[in-house]
């Protein structure tokens, strides 16, 4: 009987180790808001047009185009964060600063996707430029 | 000490640790920001207006259109067979099962890209599958499929072929009411003269 319990103990500890290993391998989520909370966030008015921009003070333009396309055509003073590098450390530093960041370039779909993703991660002062 | 007591203490302790493991809040179905970004980069989560026209014309039985505009807007000009699920009611019990399912291929659309992208992003982060976006929304649908522009004379052959296809699709969706029949007089069949047998001669 005693031996049986010891074997059971070993099995339990083994499975627990396996569980620990699996959870440590999993990428942790850095999303600040839940999907349900994002429904409310999405309702905020975050789309601006060129006329609104003239009234805004102290903003930076962030262009999501590919670098080659960015070289050939972009707003004056805009910085380039290609959509593919949205979550790289250098990009995150820009998203995290206190200035208002106006997302331009790429397709309207990608601009809204970027806004939703970054907002859910907790970055603030983000706007999307309508073309 | 009794082995049984030791084992129960160990199991209790391990259970306590397991309860404090990270990710207790998010279920494994939900996507983290990296997984979501990767999926966006694949660009397989949207269809163009032309692809949607093909799917509708071929009457794909697994297709389900979802109009995510407000109830009032959706009443005005819905696409054929669309269900209205506004952003607000995407988690309400009577609408949620349309988005969170594995049978149908849902295509979400709004006036432009904004609303549909929002609903798609929320649904996908939540772990829902089989949802797709209509790129450019209803505006792209109307401009490309319902009222296609005749290409410039200098346009490529492919552009003309695309126009032909879109014009045909437009006829399909508008009930062919726009078709202008060419005014050409019917051709009267030419009656051939019958050859007469040669008469006379020697035989």
Image: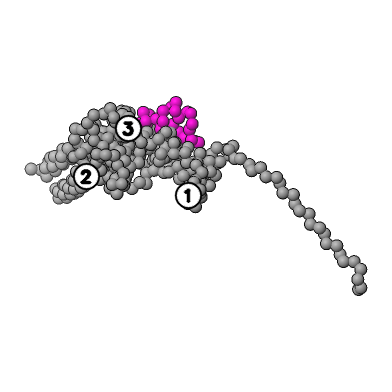
Q: Position of residue B109 (x, y in %)?
A: 42, 36
Disc 1 target residue: B155
Residue A114 placement: quadrant: top left
Q: Nearer the viewer, mark 2 or mark 1?
A: 1
Residue A32 shows in the view: no
Q: Is residue B104 left or right of residue A118?
A: right
Which circle marks residue A120 in the picture? none
Q: Considering the image in quadrants, where does the N terminus of chain B appear?
A: top left
Residue B82: say if magenta: yes
Disc 2 target residue: A88
Q: Is residue B69 left or right of residue B30?
A: right
Which chain letter matches label 3?
A
Residue placed most toward the observer, B7 or B15: B15
Q: Position of residue A37 (x, y in %)?
A: 28, 30
Residue B142: say if magenta: no
* Marked residue nearer the N-terminal end (2 or 3): 3
Q: Which residues are magenta?
A: B68-92
| Residue at the (92%, 68%) spot, across then down | B200
Residue count near mark 3 (Cα–Cα under 10 Å), binned few <14, some 14–19, many ≥20: few
Q: Position of residue B170 (x, y in %)?
A: 53, 41
Colouring convention used in this rendered image of the protein: one colour
Question: The residue tagged with tag 2: helix, strand or loop?
Answer: loop
| Residue at the (81%, 58%) spot, across then down | B193
Could you tell me if the residues under marks 3 and 1 are in contact, i.e. CB atoms within 8 Å? no
Disc 3 target residue: A50
Residue extending farthest to the top is: B72
């Amino acid at each position: 009987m005693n031996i049986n319990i010891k074997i059971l103990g070993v099995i339990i500890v083994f499975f627990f180790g396996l569980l620990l290993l699996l959870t440590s391998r999993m990428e942790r989520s850095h999303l600040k808001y839940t999907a349900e909370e994002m429904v409310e966030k999405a309702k905020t008015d975050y789309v601006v047009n060129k006329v609104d921009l003239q009234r805004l003070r102290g903003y930076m333009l962030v262009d999501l185009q590919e670098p080659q396309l960015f070289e050939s055509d972009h707003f004056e003073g805009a910085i380039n964060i290609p959509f593919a590098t949205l979550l790289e450390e250098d990009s995150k530093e820009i998203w995290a600063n206190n200035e208002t960041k106006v997302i331009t370039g790429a397709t309207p779909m990608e601009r809204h996707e970027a806004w939703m993703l970054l907002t859910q991660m907790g970055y603030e002062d983000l706007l999307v430029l309508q073309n | 000490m009794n082995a049984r007591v030791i084992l129960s203490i160990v199991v209790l302790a391990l259970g306590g640790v397991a309860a404090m493991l990270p990710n207790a809040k998010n279920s494994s179905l939900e996507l983290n920001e990296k997984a979501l970004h990767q999926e966006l980069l694949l660009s397989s989560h949207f269809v163009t207006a032309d692809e949607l026209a093909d799917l509708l014309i071929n009457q794909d039985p697994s297709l389900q259109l979802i109009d995510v505009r407000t109830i009032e807007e959706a009443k005005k000009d819905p696409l054929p067979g669309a269900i209205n699920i506004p952003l607000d009611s995407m988690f309400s019990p009577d609408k949620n099962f349309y988005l969170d399912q594995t049978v149908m291929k849902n295509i979400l659309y709004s006036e432009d890209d904004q609303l549909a992208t929002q609903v798609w992003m929320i649904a996908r982060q939540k772990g829902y599958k089989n949802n797709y976006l209509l790129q450019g929304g209803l505006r792209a649908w109307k401009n490309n499929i319902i009222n296609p522009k005749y290409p410039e004379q200098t346009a490529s052959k492919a552009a003309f072929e695309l126009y032909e296809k879109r014009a045909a699709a437009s006829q399909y969706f508008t009930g062919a009411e726009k078709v202008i029949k060419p005014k050409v007089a019917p051709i009267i069949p030419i009656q051939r003269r019958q050859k007469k047998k040669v008469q006379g001669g020697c035989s």
